[in-house]
Image: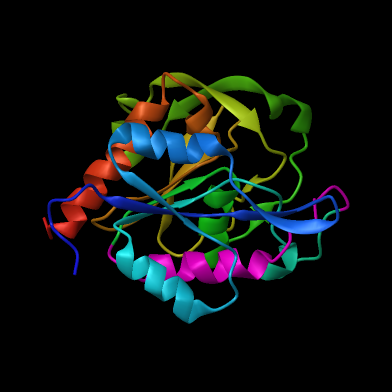
Amino acid sequence: MKSKDHPPVILLNMAVDVINGRENEVLISQYAQRVSDSGAVPMLMPSIERPEMMETLLDLADGVILIGGRDYDAREFGEEPHPEAGRNRLRPHCDIVFARLALARPIPILGICAGCQLLNIVTGGKLIQHLPNVDEHRFTTHTARVTADGYFARAVGAAPGSGLTVNSFHHQAVHPGALGRGIRVTAEAFDGSIEAVELEGSRMVLGVQFHPERMDELAPGFFNLLKEEAFRCRKGL
């Protein structure tokens, strides 16, 4: 039985990569470090293909992070993969199932980069599979703008209309003409592409297209907010 006073537990999914010819679970340590820095406890979920085990781990969690990584299969949203899509993500179905199970729980969720895109996919939306100005979005920084009140605005401490600088490591994005059910846009990049989405409702379900865990100035706002919302939801506030 969970104590209502211990630090919130944040469950993070893991990627699968091939190293020296063998499949290995992979997690960039910055995710776990930022969770720890916030005062929450990181817990890792390997890419197990058994929903009942995912449910057991979710029973122990107060919040979820959907990490970044390689592209998801476009067939998950009814399209053939673009030639530039990275179709070498191993065991992507685990993330699809995990995200759906997490959304069914009354706990906060933070989706980062591919995790933001995953939120749109599992709510019935689609992605732009390859941005036309991809060179302006990969391995760089660019400006973005808060477009609506919500958890994103709270995390960055800025009102709608305010600008900020974010990092950028992606070539795909949430499709503005094919948003998932209940998904709304709360930040846009310099070119109008989507930088942040949120799910309508009383709890935090926030996806950001950039990587706040790699930005010292922005990381505390997102990870502290996730911890606070996890604690609030646990107490039923």
Q: Residue 103 lies in magenta, yes or no?
A: yes
Relative placement, left or right, of 211 versus 17 is left
Relative placement, left or right, of 62 versus 133 is left
Q: Is residue 186 visible?
A: yes
Q: Residue 198 lies in magenta, yes or no?
A: no
Residue 228: horizontal and vertical position, in percent? 22, 42
Considering depth in this image, is 57 or 215 the residue closer to the camera? 57
Residue 161: horizontal and vertical position, in percent? 38, 24
Considering depth in this image, is 199 or 113 the residue closer to the camera? 113
Pick the quarter of the image with the C terminus: bottom left
Q: Residue furthest right?
A: 83
Q: Is residue 138 above or below residue 124?
A: above
Q: Is residue 226 above or below residue 3?
A: above
Q: Is residue 171 above or below residue 97?
A: above
Q: Residue at x 56, y 62 (%)?
A: 46
Considering depth in this image, is 107 or 22 the residue closer to the camera? 22
Q: Residue at x 73, y 61 (%)?
A: 90
Residue 29: horizontal and vertical position, in percent? 54, 37
* Snapshot quadrant of residue 108: bottom left
Start and end of the magenta stretch?
Answer: 83-106
Q: Is residue 150 visible?
A: no
* Snapshot quadrant of residue 40: top left
Relative placement, left or right, of 88 versus 127 is right
Q: Residue at x 22, y 47 (%)?
A: 7
